[in-house]
Image (cartoon, helix red, strand yellow):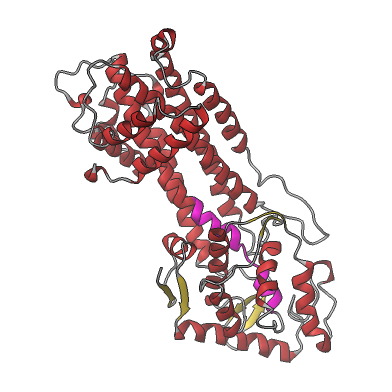
Amino acid sequence: MGVLRLEGQPIVIDDVVVVADGASIELAPDVVGTIARARRVVESVQASGSAVYGLNTHLGAGRDTRVAADEMAAFQNRVIDNHRGSIGDPLPAREVRALIFARVVGFSLGGSGVRPELADAYGRLLDGGPLPEVYATGSVGASDLALLAEIAAHVRERLPFAAGEALAAISANSYSIGVGALAVVELRALVAEADAVAALSLEALGAVGGGGSLSPFDGRVHARRRSVGQQQTAQAIRARVAGGLLEDVDWAASVQDPLSFRTVAQVHGAVRDATALAASIIEDELNAPGDNPLVVPDGDGVLLSNGNFEPLGMVLTFESLRVALAHLAGISERRIAVLSGLATPLRRSGSNAVPGLSWYAAAATLAEVRHLANPVSTSGTTLSEVEDQASFAPLAVRMLQQQIGLCREIFAVEALHAAELVRSLESPPRLGRGTSRLAAELLERIGRVDTGRNLVIDAVKAVASAGRRDTIDQ
């Protein structure tokens, strides 16, 4: 997978994906120098005897109690062990790699004050060897302490932690940032998949139901809108149906299609815009130190207590995305209802192969998607007299991941309904360059797969492939 070299350049979401997928990393000399200068500040402050949180004081409510010099090494181990409270299922290796990478990027910014050799030890975890086992539940979104403590426990087997490094290793939102970045990439794919399915449904509506108007996707409709996502969606739908029956000059489409077809550009576009905003905010978090205390190298350097570990701005984007996905799933389920109505004669004659109640399954899945859209960042809790604010960022990310999977199942049901309507016609309609292959793949599965569940599983794969394909290649 190659090597990603950290040279002080801005890190982007695609970099997280590259490392999550197997690339190793390398710290450039200038970055090592930045880390070393920050460490010298920590060592200077420590030598001065000034009280600094987590460096020579206990944590939380014990913030005003000093750590004796001869206890410093043992204190690092206690910090790690006391924070290993995560439970639940182990994270997939890809997510663990994203988490580790996000923390190494944080070290490289110089705000944490760790030694270069500790940053390197974290980087070496990405060289392809066994990864630490990290459990999903344990962070309330005020730094992913419990998850990062599992990484720290693994690293200390190779390298003992020096003064202040245990807190520096766990005081970051690395799970929420790293895995949030992976979720954004999934969302980009998801909205392309939604476009592919909506385009096929539009053609099925045109072929069987007398609809399929392209007027709502005319570039002039969107030209003065500031939503880039709306413009992109309209263009994507037009590209996918290009060359198909809906472009016939003598095509007599209905004056207006149902809203679930007519507002695709607006709904899908809003999801695109929300995803772009989330990507920007995640990258801001990725490239700015979130350490507490924060090493500031001005003059002789200082360590400042702060609240940069509070990621509410990022969490609010995750909350917004989950609401957006409820609309994305909802408009798909409404199109299923229209297509299911058109397929009524097939069910009455027994010539259908897609179970009629797959629409019910989509409706049930939509209810779950909508439930997952409820906010979690308002579920604040008080964990001690000083730790009295929490964003629940990791839960916001996990709920978003669940929604993405559920949306794909709904899209699959819609795609199957559209493909079956196309299949029912004696004279197959001419489909667009960006829908014909998807329809062919679905038709190959319809009638061959034995259960609705397996049919949907297969359709999810076909839709994912259609979302990845560039229309030029189709």
Residue 434 drawn at (x, y percent)? 26, 37
Q: Does the magenta-highlighted stretch encompass residue 175?
A: yes
Give the quarter of the image for residue 385.
bottom right
Closer to the camera, 204 or 280? 204
Closer to the camera, 95 or 140? 95
Q: Does the magenta-highlighted stretch encompass residue 170?
A: yes
- For the N terminus, the image quarter is bottom left
Give the quarter of the image for residue 202.
top left
Kindly identify the residue that appears in the image at 39 percent across and 12 percent down: 346
Residue 457 placement, left or right of 309: left
As drawn, 7 above or below 141: below
As drawn, 57 above or below 335: below
Kindly identify the residue that appears in the image at 60 percent across and 32 percent down: 368
Closer to the camera, 188 or 223? 188
As drawn, 310 above or below 203: below
> How many labels were placed on the picture?
0
Q: Is residue 227 visible?
A: no
Residue 381 placement, left or right of 215: right
Q: Is residue 76 visible?
A: yes
- The residue lying furthest to the left in this view is 249
Closer to the camera, 135 or 148? 135
> Residues in magenta?
165-183
Kindly identify the residue that appears in the image at 26 percent across and 25 percent down: 215
Residue 112 drawn at (x, y percent)? 61, 76
Residue 276 placement, left or right of 173: left
Q: Main secondary structure of the magenta part?
A: helix
Residue 246 drawn at (x, y percent)? 22, 24
Residue 42 drawn at (x, y percent)? 66, 85
- For the C terminus, the image quarter is top left
